[in-house]
Amino acid sequence: LYLSVLHILISQIHFFGSLLLLSGLPAVFMDLAEKLFFAAFLILSVAIDGMQADTMVTGTVFCDQCKDGQRSLFDYPVNGAKVILSCADSNGQITMSREETTNWFGSYTMRFNGAPDLSGCSAHVSGSGEGSTTGCGEGAGPSQNPKLMFRMFDMEMYTVDSLLAQPAQPMQYCSTSSNPVPAPDTPPNSPPHFKLPPVPPLPSLPPLPSLPPLPPVIFAEASACPSEKWTLPEYKCYWRGVNRDTKVAVAFGMVAARRYGTDITLWHGLQGRGDPYRTLLREGITALLNSYNSFQFSYHPLGVVQHMNLALMGTTRSVLHTALRFKRANSGAGNVTCKFTTCK
């Protein structure tokens, strides 16, 4: 009775330990199961002290579905597989042989009277029994040697690593790496035979547009240029703050707009002659341009606009006097010259 209980305990621990290894869990769980078995065996050994010596061999058979000679997640325990344990002497003669069939859990157990030395024996799968329906007994994997697990009270316990039974053909879902095809022989250090396609030429980029010339630097020294020079094309780069198409009404405000209208431009205003108001407009525009180009000009831009509006709101005499003062400043008052150079 005690040996039957021990047999069941060994079979279950070995089966569940194999499942733990298949699931990918660490082998420490298998070691824990073996330690629990060892503790249970110590308890049972006390009860059976004095009984006849006995030797037990146990193991498990799995179906190697991929026929790769190793355990994988596709493998499962085989029921009804025949396992043969044979022992030979130094001359290779079989001295002892025992056959056992696996149970529903794929495990088997062999008993021997006494305590024979099984270290030189080997176990292998010989085929499938009559009750086996798995179709996994046509081939067998490598044989395994029994390993002594413990010896105590004239009793021995051996375990055999998992045996593999193989089907006639590997399963279709197995990786092709199980039966690799040898690569063709290639000369050593030969470069791969391939050629890169020609790289299409890059489209030519359009030429960059030329940058406009930088405006001349504002004169730090005094400079005064008459209206005639402001109308010459070689000095057009000195127009700053306003341009030729700027309306007089925009440059000088509403008072000038009421007098000269809203359509006349600064360029047309520079052509005015023969009338005090046209003369005032010509010299006022010239003074405004000079004030934008020289820090030391006699008038500030706002001052030019202010004097222009005050003259327009006054009499014709004030218009003429303001125009003359603007003309004197634009002419340099006798000691200031025009610093213009030809624009590039």
Image (cartoon, helix red, strand yellow):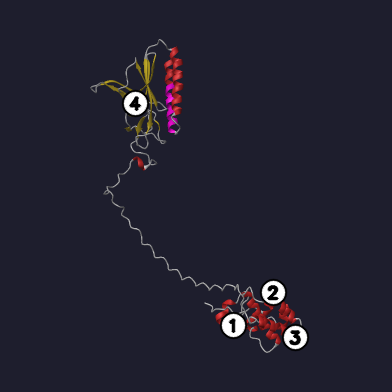
The residue lying furthest to the front in this view is: 335
Q: Which residue is mark 3?
A: 317
Query: Residue tagged by mark 4?
Result: 83
Say if mark 1 contacts mark 2, CB within 8 Å: no
Instruction: Name which of mark 1 and mark 3 comes first in the sequence.
Output: 1
Magenta stretch contains residue 198: no
* N-terminal-most mark, 1 or 4: 4
Q: Secondary structure at mark 1?
A: helix
Q: Disc 2 and disc 3: Cα gap in Å?
A: 22 Å
Q: Earlier in the sequence, mark 3 or mark 4?
A: 4
Whole-Å distance between the Cαs marked 1 and 2?
A: 22 Å
What amino acid does circle 3 point to?
Arg
Mark earlier in primary sequence (2, 3) = 2
Please say if the residues under marks 1 and 3 sit with CB atoms less than 8 Å apart. Answer: no
Q: Measure how far apart labels 4 and 2 are at the Cα level.
A: 116 Å
Q: Label 3, label 4: how many angstroms apart (C-alpha)?
A: 137 Å
* Range of magenta residues: 9-22
Give how far across and how far down residue 240 sits, in percent. Answer: 61, 75
Q: What residue is disc 2 on?
A: 302
Dot 3 falls on a residue whose secondary structure is helix
Instruction: Answer few, some or many: residues within 10 Å of disc 1's Cα (few below 14, many 20 plus, some between 14 and 19).
Output: some
Report, in whole angstroms, how far the alpha carbon at label 1 lies from the one at label 4: 120 Å
* 164 is higher (above) or lower (below) than 194: above
Name the front one of labels 1 and 4. Answer: 1
Q: In what element is the residue under mark 4?
A: strand
Asked if one can make out residue 2 in the rendered structure from this viewpoint, the answer is yes
